[in-house]
Every structure is written in C-alpha cells, then in structure tokens.
Amino acid sequence: MGYVADLHIHSRYSRACSPALNVPNLVEWGKLKGIDVLGTGDCLHPLWFAELKSQLTDDGSGFLSFEKDPAVKFVLTVEVASIYSHQGAVRRIHNVIMLPSFESVEKLQKALLVKKANLSSDGRPIVGIPSKELLRMCLEIDQNVIFMPAHAWTPWFGIFGSQSGYNSLQDCFEDLTEYIHAIETGLSSDPAMNWRIKELDNRSIISCSDAHSLPNLGREATVFGGNLEDRYEGLWKAISNKIATLRQAQGKLPRNDGIVGTIEFYPEEGKYHYTGHRSCNVKYSPEDTKLKGEKCPVCGRGLTVGVMERVEAMASRSNVELKIENVQGLIKSRAFPERAGYRMLVPLLQIIAEAFETAPTTQKVLNEYKKLTTFLGNEMKILTKIKTDEIAKVSGHKVAEGVEKVRKGDLVIDPGYDGVYGIVKIWDHGKEIAKEAEEAPQLGLFD
C-alpha cells in the first residue's frame, strides 16, 4: 500500500512558528495534504511533550495516534542545533532525531539536562554538544534511534554547509559514521544533487518539509513502500536500508517495501541555492563563480556560498554520469536504478493563488483549496492523479491549466541566494505575486 511521511516539522513552541501548530490542526492538515505519518517535531520541549503525552496514544508500535481522529499517525521527532568547536572551526550543525517511544524521549531529556541543556526556551534546542556525542547519547538510549543531519547543505546549519559544515560525514561523526543511515536533502537541494556524492551512495535520501506553519506541511516528504502496520520498526528498517541489504543477501530483486520516492520542492526556490550577497543584490551561478570568484564585487566581502556551488565542489561524479531521465514526471538515474525516484511539484495553494493573481494566504485562495479537496480528494490526488477536466469543473480552466503546467514542468524559475527565497512561477504575469516567506504554503505530494 505505501504511505507518505513528513518527518521534520515544528510545533508552536519553536521560534518563528505559527501558534496554530497543535495536534488537532496537524491531523486536519495532514489529511488535506495526503500525509499518513507526521513527525511531532520539538518532542524535547517540556510543554509540547506534555501535550503529546496527553493527546496521543502510544500502543507500543512507535507510531502514535490522536484518539479523536487516528487518520494520521505520529512519530516522535526533534531537531537539535549543536554549536561547538571541532577541527579548528566553529560548527553549527542541525540534526533530526526520531525516537520510538515516550520513554526514550524522557531518557534523552534527562541526559541532555545533565549536560546543562536548556530544553524550555525553544522547541529546537541549542546545545553545546558535538554532533558525534549527541549521536552517541541517542544510541545509548535506543539502538533503533533514527539520527540524520538536517537540511544537509544549508550554508550556516547543514553538515555540508559552506559556512560551518564539514567536507564529509566521516569528518563529523568519525567512528560513529556507520550509524548515519540517511541525510535530509533540505529545500535547496534535490536527490540528484545528493546522488553525486559518493559517501551518500549507501545512505537514504530523505525529504521533509521543515514546516513552521500548517500550510507548509508536505512541501517535501518521503514515500515509503511498506505498510503502516510495519510500525516504527518498518520505518527504521527502510531508512537504515536493512530491507534492501537483507534482500540483496538473499539474492532477491529489490521490492517496493523501503523508500520508494520523495516529493521535492524546486531546489531553486530554496533561499540558499545559488551563491550571493543579498545586501548588494549579487547572485552567482556556479559558472559565474568560476569566472568571478567568491568575493562580492560591490562591498568586497566574501559571498555566501550556495548549495549548488557546494555540491559542485564536493561531487564525486557529474550530472552527465548520473544519466538522469524524467518519465512522466518521475525523475530517476539510469546509472543508479536502485535509487528511489522523485517528483518535483508546486503546492496547490500556490497554483490557485497564481491563477487568481493574489497571495497564497488570502481567504479566497483557502476557500478554493477547501472546495477542491472536498470534491476531488486530498492534494496528493489532485496534483498527480485527477484529470484536469475534472479540476476545471470545480475550479475553472485557469487552475486546471496550472496543474497541467506543473505536471509538465513548464515553469518560470529564478533561483534563491543568501537567505532570499527563489521564485517558481507557473505563469509569467509580468509582475510579482505577493509572497510571504514563512506563511506562504509551499508543499508537494507524490504518488
């Protein structure tokens, strides 16, 4: 059957997050998006953890349910920011941790409190503990913890980031590197960019929304081929590649019971895709940087090196070597056929907003979104399955045309840089559509 999971989100207890991020609302919006499993986010925060314990049922499977509406399952997750000095440099690395039970969360809370960590000030706690030691602490609590670097390429907070990251997983995790089974791509990179890195060949590529608001849920997500009945254990086996390894040892062909695909935000829309300096309005592609260097021509300071530039510097193989093919919207590598494919999508709210030439956050757009999902099903189905003539019957020709253009990849793209979000437009209206950086609902769904 398979299921869609968005495993990195936040609660209202994280800074710059919507106050509407509570359990009932997460369930409601998860259903609208077509998401089957949500990370709780922020599970180490005492107040949010208390809410989770009071509102979610733990049946011992590792997947939690909201008793009033069990349609969406939850898994306990948290993003932790580690700031520390290592190998002669200051590191600012964010990691996502998934835990199988309330008990394991409580153990991690206690272990971090012993280290003088402040768990109450922010849902995404900041600790002075090196990433390797944080991983060690988690493994001592539960060997089936899922620990992965968050938004791996972000310049300031990614493990491969140009400003405070490393040149390899091995540099960071040393003798514990074997326990890093996956990385999160982040909004500014897609799987193909990560396939170019040899160190990631045997690791899972996970996509998540990192949502700070309800409409942003599912803007990136991961599709698993197993069943929800496989529980947390099945999730762990899929992410850690245990299923693929077992089948290979048995001489059997791959089967769709691990990770089967991801939903991708256009990486150009991420705010660190290209190299640049926003205060001087300077933006460079990797080709530009080769010609002009990494110094700002306006102020003379160093440019913020973007994700695309960083991938080019670390890549073990070229795009040509990947032999990328796009078959009806599913992007795969013929050089690495065992790799799960991915789909690039634009959020339905954004499509409606552009069709109406207004902002995605207006009541008019939300009303139309609710009408579409009421008549035609969740966003996953609308973006990937529903015939455009059926969409036109509900919302008119323009919205249907927008969905069709997204399916074909017929878009206008202007890459982001140095903290400035890129722009992905369906139509070139000749003017900017109003865009709110955090509340603008960017999401995508996969089938």
Image (cartoon, rainbow, N blue to C red):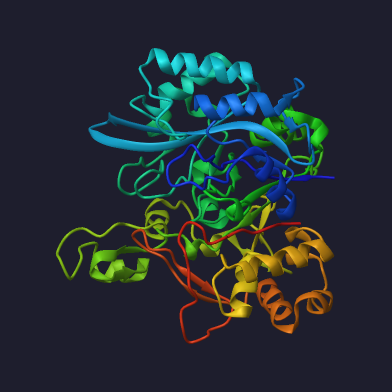
Q: Between residue 80 and residue 413, name the one nearer to us.
A: 80
Q: In this image, 299 relative to 17: left or right?
A: left
Q: Is 434 placed above or below 264 here?
A: below
Q: Quadrant of residue 206?
A: top right
Q: Is 146 placed above or below 398 here?
A: above
Q: Residue at x 37, y 47 (%)?
A: 161
Q: Between residue 319 and residue 369, name the one nearer to us.
A: 369
Q: Is 370 placed above or below 28 here?
A: below
Q: Residue at x 61, y 51 (%)?
A: 217
Q: Quadrant of residue 116?
A: top left
Residue 203 in percent (x, y) is at 58, 39
Q: Quadrant of the image for the C terminus? A: bottom right
Residue 441 in percent (x, y) is at 57, 60
Q: How many marks?
A: 0
Q: In this image, 39 relative to 285: left or right?
A: right
Q: Residue at x 78, y 35 (%)?
A: 68
User: Farthest residue in the left direction?
Assistant: 300
Residue 1 in percent (x, y) is at 85, 45
Q: In this image, 92 relative to 424: left or right?
A: left
Q: Is residue 444 visible?
A: yes
Q: Is residue 249 visible?
A: no
User: Farthest residue in the bottom direction?
Assistant: 430
Q: Between residue 200 and residue 221, name the one nearer to us.
A: 221
Residue 58 in percent (x, y) is at 73, 23
Q: Is 394 placed above or below 32 here?
A: below
